[in-house]
Amino acid sequence: MDLVAVSCRHEAAHEVADYTRVRARRILRALGLRRRPLSVSLVGDEEMRRLNRRYRGRNRATDVLSFALDEGPFGSLSHGMLGDVVISMETALRLARRRRRAFREVIEELLLHGILHLAGYDHERSREDACKMRLKELEVKRALGSHRLGTGTRGRGGSSEGRSRRLC
């Protein structure tokens, strides 16, 4: 049974669906979460804007959202499912162009960022938590053999190691 389900809800999603599934499995394995089911939805900006407005109160598209299923009042009903990661294909494409990066690399970085949130990491709580998340991201990238370690997941360029030192 495949524990990673990918839902394609945007025309650009089909070209990266298999890649996303494979990379999600590798990220989960690197985090010691390979037996936890995960759902990934590849959507457009309009759907992402609606989700962001409904769940975060921000009426704009964003690159990635995560929805942990083992939190909140119904967390005990998750049956071990890790949660949902939602990635905007249109935003990812804009990021790839702006950063002069391959579309798949950006998808993988957004996927990693979303899964780290599901694993309990949160860069928005405190500077210390942001540092922990950034260091875990680098650790996973190294485990995956990522060839672009110096590029930040959501930053505007520069060395990720440099940002990690500044965060820590």
Image: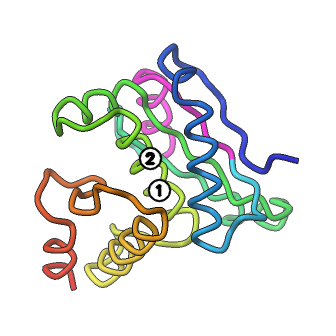
Q: Which mark is residue 108?
A: 2
In this image, 147 relative to 121: left or right?
A: left
Which residue corresponds to the image point at 56% horizontal and 49% vertical from the top-left? Answer: 23
Q: Magenta residues?
A: 39-55
Applied colour scheme: rainbow
Which residue corresponds to the image point at 52% horizontal and 18% vertical from the top-left? Answer: 10
In this image, 15 relative to 79: left or right?
A: left
Q: Is residue 167 above or below residue 18?
A: below
**Tag 2, which secondary structure?**
helix
Residue 2 position, x and y percent, is 81, 46
Residue 107 position, x and y percent, is 42, 40
Q: Which mark is residue 112?
A: 1
Say what amino acid the circle numbered 2 marks: Glu
Query: Viewer-proximal residue, 121 or 164?
Result: 164
Classed neighbour count for the residue bearing mark 2: other residues with Cα under 10 Å, few (<14), some (14–19), many (≥20): many
Q: Is residue 112 above or below residue 98?
A: below
Say what amino acid the circle numbered 1 marks: Leu
Chief secondary structure of the magenta span?
helix
Which residue corresponds to the image point at 56% horizontal and 60% vertical from the top-left? Answer: 27
In this image, 22 relative to 111: left or right?
A: right
**Tag 1, which secondary structure?**
helix
Q: Quadrant of residue 91?
A: top left
Q: Quadrant of residue 36?
A: bottom right
Q: Which mark is residue 56?
A: none
Q: Is residue 118 above or below residue 44?
A: below
Question: Marks 2 and 1, Cα distance to the nearest angstrom?
Answer: 6 Å
Q: Say if mark 2 contacts mark 1, CB within 8 Å.
A: yes
> Which quadrant, please, contains the C terminus?
bottom left
Q: Is residue 96 magenta?
A: no
